[in-house]
Image (cartoon, helix red, strand yellow):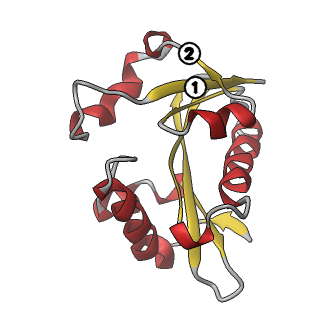
């Protein structure tokens, strides 16, 4: 089941994101940041009520949102959870009247299969880069910018 995140999910979200953050495949989020932006997050919950996947949709600009912090526990990968989390975000974006959604990723094939197209990072507004200063790879970002337009 995919649903909007709740306060009680923050520790599990933090654990998942920290795991992948330590591998350098996504930007870790502090507990403070997770609480501050909880409304951006959605989770996949298994039949036992455990959070197995997480994603956030962050509104960036007038008609632009970012899919960020997409992560699925390693033991749960390959079950379509990531795809369903992204679809949840895309539906949320449309509900908000946002018809351009981008992501910065290392998983180009995954997002391409979902209809995202690779774009030059320079087309994204400067506001998008506010989180970059917290990234250990800054200023030498090697993530791929991908965009979906409805």
Q: Is residue 78 left or right of residue 103?
A: right
The residue depicted at 31 percent of the width and 65 percent of the height is: 31
Q: Secondary structure at mark 2?
A: loop
Q: Does the image show residue 137?
A: yes
* Quarter location, residue 48: bottom right
Q: Percent from the top left, x then y, of residue 59?
A: 54, 36
Location of the C terminus by quadrant is top right
Q: Which numbered tag is attached to residue 146? A: 1
Q: Percent from the top left, x then y, of residue 16?
A: 43, 66
Mark 1 or mark 2, earlier in chain: 2
Q: Is residue 123 above or below residue 92?
A: above
Location of the N terminus by quadrant is bottom right
* Quarter location, residue 92: top right
Q: Which numbered tag is attached to residue 18? A: none
Q: Is residue 100 above or below residue 49?
A: above
Q: Secondary structure at mark 1?
A: strand
User: Looking at this view, is 3 or 55 the one in front?
Assistant: 55
Residue located beneath label 2 in the image: 119
Q: Does the image show residue 29?
A: no
Q: Is residue 27 left or right of residue 63?
A: left
The residue depicted at 34 percent of the width and 62 percent of the height is: 18
Alpha carbon separation for disc pair 1 and 2: 5 Å
User: Looking at this view, is 1 or 78 the one in front?
Assistant: 78
Q: Is residue 31 above or below residue 124?
A: below
- Local crowd at mark 1 within 10 Å, few (<14), some, or many (≥20)? many
* Quarter location, residue 85: bottom right
The residue depicted at 22 percent of the width and 30 percent of the height is: 138
Q: Is residue 15 above or below residue 123?
A: below
Q: Residue furthest bottom?
A: 48
In contact (CB < 8 Å): disc 1 and disc 2: yes
């Amino acid at each position: 089941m995919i649903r909007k995140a709740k306060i009680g999910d923050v520790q599990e979200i933090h654990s998942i994101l920290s795991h992948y953050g330590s591998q350098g495949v996504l930007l870790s989020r502090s507990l403070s940041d997770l609480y501050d932006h909880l409304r951006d997050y959605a989770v996949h919950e298994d039949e036992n009520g455990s959070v197995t996947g997480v994603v956030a949709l962050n509104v960036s600009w007038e008609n632009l949102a970012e899919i960020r912090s997409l992560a699925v526990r390693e033991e749960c990968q390959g079950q379509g959870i990531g795809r369903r989390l992204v679809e949840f975000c895309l539906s949320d974006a449309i509900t908000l009247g946002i018809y351009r959604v981008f992501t910065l990723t290392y998983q180009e094939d995954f997002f391409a299969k979902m209809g995202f197209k690779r774009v030059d990072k320079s087309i994204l507004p400067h506001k998008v880069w506010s989180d970059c200063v917290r990234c250990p790879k800054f200023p030498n970002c090697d993530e791929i910018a991908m965009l979906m337009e409805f």
